[in-house]
Structure formats: C-alpha cells, structure tokens
Image (cartoon, helix red, strand yellow):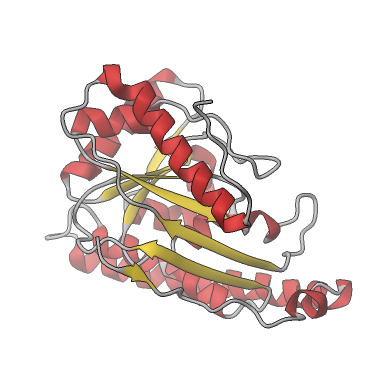
Amino acid sequence: MSDPAVAATQPPAPGRHRVLGNPVARTVLSVWAWIVLVTVIIVWTPMVFVVWLVTLPFDRGHYAAGYLFRKLTVAHQVLNPLWTFRTTGTMITDPRRPYVVIANHQSFVDILLISHLPWEMKWLSKQHFFRFPLVGWMMRMAGDIRLVRGERDSVIQAMAACKDRLERKTSVMIFPEGTRSRDGELKEFKDGAFRLAIENQVPILPLAVNGAYKAMVKGDWRFGVSDAEVRVLEPISTDGLTLADLPDLKRRAHQTIADAVHDMRGLPRIDESA
C-alpha cells in the first residue's frame, strides 16, 4: 500500500447542485450524458477487442483488455457534468497482488465509480449484464465472471472462476450484500467473498462507497446530480485463517466499511458488536 492518494476530482463549487439540479437543466444534461454513454460504449468496444486479440497469446487473464474496458467509465464521467467522482484512501502499489475486493452497494453507479480505481479487477456480475449488446461482449473479453442468482451450480462455477482469476494474479470484485441497498444503509454480508478469501489465503480489500445512489434516481430516466466517492481502506489479512474464522472476518469487514461510510457522511460511528 502507498501513501493516501489525492482525490481524483476536487469537490464541487458551491451552488453546483442548485444550478444543475434544476429540472430543465437536469433533463437537458441527462440527454447529453446518455448520448455520451452510448457513444463511448460504441467507440470502446472495438478498442477492447483489438487489445484482447493482440494480448491474448501472453495475457491469458485478460488484464489489459479489462483495464481498458473499465476506463470507459472515466471518459463518460469527465463528459457528464452532473457527476463528480473522487477516489481516495490508500491505494495499492502492486496491481498484480490479488485481493478479494468488497464494497457496499448503493446504486448501479457504484460500478462506474469503483472502475475509476487505477488497477484492474474482475467483477462477479449477474448473468443479465452479459446479455447487453457491446457491454456484455466487453465483459466477456475482460474475463468478468457471470452468476445466475439462486442456482447452486452457477455459484460453484462462479467461485471456481474467481479462484482462477486470483491464481492469474488479478483481484476479484464482489458486492457482499448481494444486491443494492434501497435506502443506502449497509445490509448484512453474505459468506461467499469471505469463504473465497480464506480458501485462497488472499487478503480482503474493503472499499467504502458514498453518494453514488444520488447519481441515478429510482424510477427516473434522468441522471441525478452526484458527488460520489470511493475510499480504499486497509486490507484485512486472511493468513492462517480457516472457515471457522469466517463469521469474525465478515463482521470485521462489515464494521470497517460501516465506519468509513459514516465518516464520509459526517455521522458518528456505530459499534456493531454492542
């Protein structure tokens, strides 16, 4: 890990929310942002394909193709005046040191925000994302991992694929809540990410996300005005842990992310052990 990173984007100027949050301005800018998103996806797909094809003989883990794929989110955010994203915390120094990366899940925009981090990781994603034209193709070229929720065989295959990515020296990204939080509050974590980390003896890397839920308003096609942040927290070692330690590891990770989210919101911390 390195020294705390400087925020990628500075906080917005006063009045920004008031001006851009005007219904007319938000509608016009949302039309622009959707056009930009579609255009970037169209432009990015052949670029990712070329990188995937050229690097295929020596990059079987598809690190380069995946890294380029994530960067389309950076291009979109730069051209979308409604969103301001920041990456803060203590950045990892070795991108090929594998972690099981976990984060709280507030919105679909969490994915776009976390993709701003300066290293590649393979995402465990629901199957329907792979069906999207162009985006699904890039996810396959990037080596992302599909999961059919509720199907035991799919879970087993997905965990085997995660193990494969870790062995190829690439981190795996999992939302341990399993689904988005409706109210922005942190839900209970499922066991999968922690079992994976213990069985493969790789550290947990927690991320705290805040503000992304404002970027997409439920039931509204328009984007919201959002100042979102992802904070990289200190890794949690799994050296020497067994599955008997899973509940404690899960509790510790949950507390770590909950504390960080409360700090980011300016709220007092909650002791979950009380």
Q: x%, y% of residue 32?
A: 70, 77
Q: Quadrant of residue 76?
A: bottom right
Q: Quadrant of residue 70?
A: bottom left
> How many discs appear?
0
Q: x%, y% of residue 27?
A: 81, 72
- In the picture, which quadrant includes the N terminus? bottom left
Q: x%, y% of residue 72?
A: 46, 70
- The residue shown at (80%, 50%) is 219
Q: Is residue 184 left or right of residue 105?
A: right
Q: Is residue 217 above or below residue 2?
A: above
**Residue 73 can be seen, yes or no:** no
Q: Is residue 142 above or below residue 30?
A: above
**Residue 272 can be seen, yes or no:** yes
Q: x%, y% of residue 94?
A: 19, 61
Can you name the residue that lies furthest to the left here? 58
Q: Is residue 17 above or below residue 244?
A: below
Q: Is residue 11 above or below residue 98?
A: below
- The residue shown at (40%, 30%) is 250
- The residue shown at (31%, 31%) is 159
Foreground residue, 60 or 78? Answer: 78
Foreground residue, 150 or 87? Answer: 87
